[in-house]
Image (tube, grey):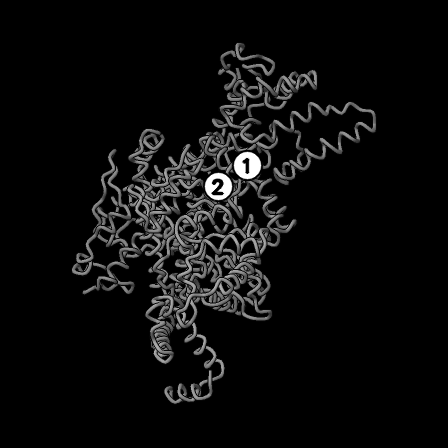
Amino acid sequence: MKERCIRAVSQALGRQITAQEARDIEQRILANLRREAQADPAGFQSMTWVEQLQKAAERSARELVAEAALKKRRVALQAAAMDRLQNFVADQSAAGMPGLDAVRRTLVVIADGKSNTLSAETRADAIRANAVRQLMDTFEAVDPRMWGLFENVEGVETLVRAIYGEQTGNAKVDAGAKAWLNVAEQLRKQFNEAGGAIGKLEDWAVPQHHSQLKVSKAGVDQWVADTLPRLNRDKYVNMDGSAMSDQQVVDFLKAAWLTIATGGINKITPGGNNGIGMMAGRNAEPRSIHFRDATAYLEYQKQYGERSLWDVMVGHVGHLSREISMIETFGPNPHHAFSLLLEQEMQRQAVARPQSTGKVRTEAVRLQSLYDFVTGRTNPVANEHVAQAFDTLRNWLVASRLGSAVITALSDEATIHLTAHVNNLPELQLVRNELSALNILNQTDKNLAHRAGLALDTMLGALNRWGQDTISNNWSNKMASSVMRASGMDALDGARRRAFGTTMMSSLGEVAGKYQRLADIDPVDYRILLSKGITETDFAIWKMAQLEQWGAGNGVLTPESIMRIPDTQLMASGAVPRPDGQLSVGLTAAEAAAYKRDAVLRLIGVTLEETNMAMIRPGLNERFFTSGQFSRGTFSGEIARSFFLFKSFPIAMIYRHWMRGLNMETTGGKAAYIASLMAGTTVIGAVSQTVNDLLGGKNPRNYNPFEGEHGYKNWMAAMLKGGSLGIYGDFLFSQATHYSKIGAVGALLGPLAGLVEESMNLTQGNLIQLAQSKDTKFGAELVRFIRGNLPGGSLWYAKAALDHAVFNQLQEYFSPGYLAQMERRARKEFGQTYFWQPSAGFSDIRAPEWQRAVGQ
C-alpha cells in the first residue's frame, strides 16, 4: 500500500495503522476487486479505475464491519460456552466425579448412566442423522441396485445434472436434488449460527473430491491438461474484469495441483501456527476450482475421484456435522476451550492431591489425544500406499471370515432386551416391532424409520461394527461391504435398529404425554433417560408434538412431529422453560426455531445412544482405543490397527455394558445387570453355536453339564461366543481358526497375524519339511489356505455346499484320511458327530440328532 493511502486510512481510523494492517487491507481490496469483476465482468470493465477501486473499497468496508460484529458475537458465544462447561464440571465434581472424567463426558459417550449431558459425539451423530434422514429423496433418486451393493451410474448422472440446475424431466430426481441443496444450505446456516462464517456460493452444487494418489500420479502437466477444458472460465477474471488468459489459468491450476498432490503440505509455514486456528473460521475460503457444468464435474470425478457420489455427499454432511457439534458444545474456538478446561481440571486435581500428579498428567495427555482424534487433528497418512495395502488386507479378511457373522449376531437379542429393560421400554411392543421390521416386504415402516433418522448407518452400508475405517472406497472395501450385505448382516442389523429406535421414540412420546414436567418422571424407571442431559425445555417441546401413528400401537415422537409444531405456538405459549428454569415469554421466530431444532437433536441423540447400546456399535472412545492412537500409513501403526480387527465389538461390550452394569446404583442392581448380561448372551450364544454347527453338517453339541464330559465345556464356549466376556470370546472362537491351523499366538494377535502364520507355514514351513525329507502335504495345506481366505466362502448358506462339493474332496485327495481326522477332532474336542458326513454327497444328508443337545 502506498504511503499516502496508509496516511489516509490512519487518519480515518484516528490512529496509525501497522505495516501488517496495511498489507491486510491491500490484500482485501485486491481480492474484492476480483470478486466484483467476477460478479459483473462487463459492468466492471465499463467503470474507471477509481470507480472500480471505490467499489472494492466499499465491499471491503462492509466485510470489516461484518467481521467486527462476528468477532464480538464469537466472544459472547465463547464466554457462554465456557460458563456452561465450567458449571457442568463444577456440578459433577461436587457430586463426587473427578473433574477430568467430567471433561471427557462433554466430548464422548460414556455409557455408565452418570454423564448428565449430551456429549459432542452424540450431538454430531444427531446432526448427521437429522441431515441424512432428509436426504431419503436424494438416496431414492439414485436408485441403488442389488440392495445397495452397486451404484446406479445413470441415476447418479441424472441427479448431478438436476443439482446443477439442468431440466431432467424426472420429478423424483428433481425432488432428490432439491432435498440435497436444502440440507446443504441448512448445515451452512447452522454452522454460521454457531459462530462460523461460510459464505454462500451461488453456483455451489456438490462437494468436490480429489484423490491425492490419482492427482499426483497423473503429474502436473497431464492434470492441468485434463482439468482446464472442464472449468467455468467466467469465474476466472483479472482485477479489472478482463478474462484471465490460458496461461494465467494454467499457472493457477499448477499451484492447485501442488496443493492437492501434497495434501496441503506445500502451504505449511515451518514454525508457524499451522492448522490450529479457530474452528468457526474454517470453511470460509471460497472454492477455487469451478467446473463448467454437471458433465465436467462427472468426468473429473470419474478420472480423479475415488468415492461414489453418495460417499462424497455423506462425507460432506459428516464433516460439517462434527464441526457444528464441536462449536455448539465448546464455543467458536473449541480447541482453546477444551485445552483451558483440561488445564484447569488438571491443576485443580493435582493441587488437591499432589501425590497423584503423575497419574493426573497422564490422564490429561490421553484426554487431549482423544480430543485430537475426535476433531481430526491427528497426523496425516504417512504413506497412502502402505495404508491402502493394509486396508485391502483387512477388507479381504472381512470378506473371507465374516460371512457367518449374522449367526454370531444372534446374541444381540440379549443386549437388545437388557437395554430395553433398563430404559423401561415395553417388551411386547419391542418384539412386535422387531418381527415387523424383519418382514422384507414391509417397506412402509422401513421408510418411516429412515425418515425419522433410524438405522441410517446400516442403510449406508457402514462397517463400524467391525472397526473398519478405510481411506478410500476402493474395490476391496466394496467387496467387504458386499459380503456383509449378502450374508444378511446389514438387513438384520438394520431391522433391529429400526425396531428398537421405533420403540424408543414411541416410549418417549408416551412419557411426554404422561408427565407434565421432566422433574415428575420416576428417576428409577427412567434413570438412563435422565442421564442424557435432557432439559425441561426439550421435554416441554416434546409434549407439544402431535405423535405420528405408525400402526401396531406405535404413536411415535419423531423429528418431523417436532418440526411441525407451529413457531407461533411456541412464541405464544410461554410454556418453554429457559435454562435458568424460568418460563420464556415472547419468543422470537428465530428462538422458537432454535428451541425446536435442539429438541429434535436431543430426541435423535438419546435414541441413537441407546440403540448403539442395544446393538453394540463402537463409539469414538472405543475406536480411539482400537485405532485412533496409531499412525496411518506406517507399518507399526497399521500392524497395531490390524491387531484390533474384529475386536472393536467385544471391546465395546466391555466399555458399554460392563461399565453400565458395574455403575448401577445399588449392589443388587450391579449383580442383576451383570448376571442378566452373562445369562442372556450365554444362552443365545449356545443357540448361535448350534445354528453354526447345523449349517456345518454337525449334530448339536451336548449342553447337559451333568451328562458326559463336554457339557460344561460347551457352555463355556457358548458364554465366550455370546460375547459377555468380551475380547476373550473373539480370541478363542474367531472364525479365523475354523478352516486353518492358526496357533494360539496367531489367534491372540488377530486375523492378520494368523494370515501371516498360515502363509509362512505354507511356504517356509514346507521348504523346511522338504529339506528334512518329510511329507510336506503342500496340496492339502494349499486347499485349506484357499478355503479359509476365499471372499464370500464363509457365507453361512453356502459354506457347507462348497465344502461338500469341492473342498472336502480336494482335501481328501491331497491328504488321504483328512476327513476322518476332522471327524475325530470334533468328537474329541466337543463330543460332536456329523449328520452330514464330510465325505458324503448331497443325497446322503440325514436328519440332525437333536437328542444329543441334552446328552442323549
Residue drawn at x 49%, y 12% is: 847
Q: Quadrant of residue 25?
A: bottom left
Q: Give me the disc on residue 463.
A: 2
Graded by Cα atoms within 10 Å as few (under 14), some (14 to 19) or many (20 or more), the crowding at tag 1 reads many
Q: Residue at x 54, y 54 (%)?
A: 223
Alpha carbon distance from label 2 to label 1: 10 Å
Rendered image quadrant of residue 171: top left
Precedes in sequence: disc 2 or disc 1: 1
Q: Quick check: 637 above or below 777?
A: below
Are dots 2 and 1 in contact, CB under 8 Å?
yes
Which residue is farthest top? Answer: 843
Crowd class of label 2 (few under 14; some 14 to 19; many from 20; radius 10 Å): some
Which numbered dot is residue 33? Answer: none
- Residue 376 on image: x %, y %: 50, 57
Q: Position of residue 549 (x, y in %)?
A: 22, 39
Which residue in the structure is indicated by mark 1?
A: 398
Q: Position of residue 264 (x, y in %)?
A: 54, 61
Instruction: Find numbered disc 2 in the image and state the secondary structure of the residue it sits on.
Output: loop
At label 2, the amino acid type is Leu
| Residue 702 in view, yes or no | no
Q: Is residue 153 visible?
A: yes
Q: Secondary structure at mark 1?
A: helix
Q: Position of residue 12 (x, y in %)?
A: 36, 87
Between 482 and 378, the one lying in front of the other is: 482
> Please, is residue 295 above or below residue 31 in the view?
above
The residue at 39%/52% (across/down) is 293
Q: Nearer the viewer, residue 854 or 47?
A: 47
Which residue is pictured at 50% across the width and 59% down the height?
Answer: 371
